[in-house]
């Protein structure tokens, strides 16, 4: 089963992840780690439908990327001198990732794919096997959740 998932989704996941990370090498490493986790959770994946397996891979990959960002951020903070850091009112990448991760259902993934990676509603719908109208509805809900979470700061 894992081999079938790999053959079917490997290239798609690498492209999606490369859009998030900006690096082919990092994307390949994260996708490899996601499939390693899939192997460790093969019993669970066996209970899921095809669409759910695909969603599990995307969510796992996104979480691995967030973990990597957090790890990198901690290394940067330790390396910096406190007097050299500039305080900013803008949100950091990690804060955005946490905020997107807090969205219900698949809203964070859909928002990232639409507004950060440039997929349109039809393409996203094809990836997740849902109608484009449902994608747009979930994106609208995601924008509302983000605006509520940001207290109307105008980022979204």
Image (cartoon, helix red, strand yellow):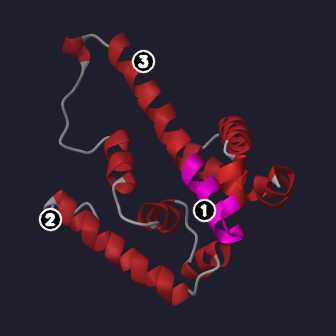
- Tally the marks: 3
Contact between marks 1 and 2 (CB within 8 A): the answer is: no
Residue receiving disc 2:
152
Picture quadrant where residue 128 is located: bottom right
Up the image or down, 62 lies above or below 123; here it is above
Residue at 63 percent of width and 49 percent of height: 17
Q: Nearer the viewer, residue 102 or 124?
A: 102
On residue 36, the disc is none
Considering the numbered disc 2 on the image, is that residue within a helix, a strand or a loop? loop
Q: Is 132 positioned to the left or the right of 154 in the image?
A: right
On residue 75, the disc is 3
Percent from the top left, x then y, of residue 131? 57, 87
Residue receiving disc 1:
55
Up the image or down, 93 lies above or below 118; here it is above
Q: Is 65 positioned to the left or the right of 101 in the image?
A: right
Magenta stretch bounds:
47-60
Residue at 45 percent of width and 26 percent of height: 71
Q: Nearer the viewer, residue 27 or 131?
A: 131
Label 1 – label 3 distance at C-alpha: 30 Å
Q: Is residue 50 magenta?
A: yes
Q: Earlier in the sequence, mark 1 or mark 2?
A: 1
Q: Earlier in the sequence, mark 1 or mark 3?
A: 1
Contact between marks 1 and 3 (CB within 8 A): the answer is: no
Percent from the top left, x then y, of residue 121? 55, 80
Considering the numbered disc 1 on the image, is that residue within a helix, a strand or a loop? helix
In front: mark 1 or mark 2? 1
Q: Is 86 positioned to the left or the right of 110 in the image?
A: left
Label 1 – label 2 distance at C-alpha: 30 Å
Contact between marks 2 and 3 (CB within 8 A): the answer is: no
Q: Which secondary structure dominates the residues rendered in magenta?
A: helix
Point out the image quarter for the N terminus: bottom right
Up the image or down, 30 lies above or below 8; here it is above
């Amino acid at each position: 089963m894992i081999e079938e998932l790999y053959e079917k989704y490997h290239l798609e996941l690498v492209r999606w992840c490369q859009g998030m990370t900006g690096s082919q090498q990092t994307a390949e490493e994260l996708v490899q780690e996601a499939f390693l986790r899939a192997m460790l959770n093969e019993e669970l994946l066996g209970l899921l439908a095809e669409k759910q397996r695909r969603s599990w891979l995307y969510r796992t990959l996104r979480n691995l990327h967030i973990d990597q960002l957090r790890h990198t951020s901690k290394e940067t903070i330790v390396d910096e001198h406190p007097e050299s850091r500039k305080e900013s009112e803008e949100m950091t990448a990690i804060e955005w990732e946490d905020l997107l991760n807090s969205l219900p259902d698949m809203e964070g993934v859909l928002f990232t794919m639409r507004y950060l990676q440039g997929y349109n509603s039809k393409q996203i719908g094809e990836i997740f096997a849902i109608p484009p109208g449902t994608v747009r509805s979930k994106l609208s809900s995601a924008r509302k959740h983000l605006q509520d979470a940001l207290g109307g700061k105008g980022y979204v």
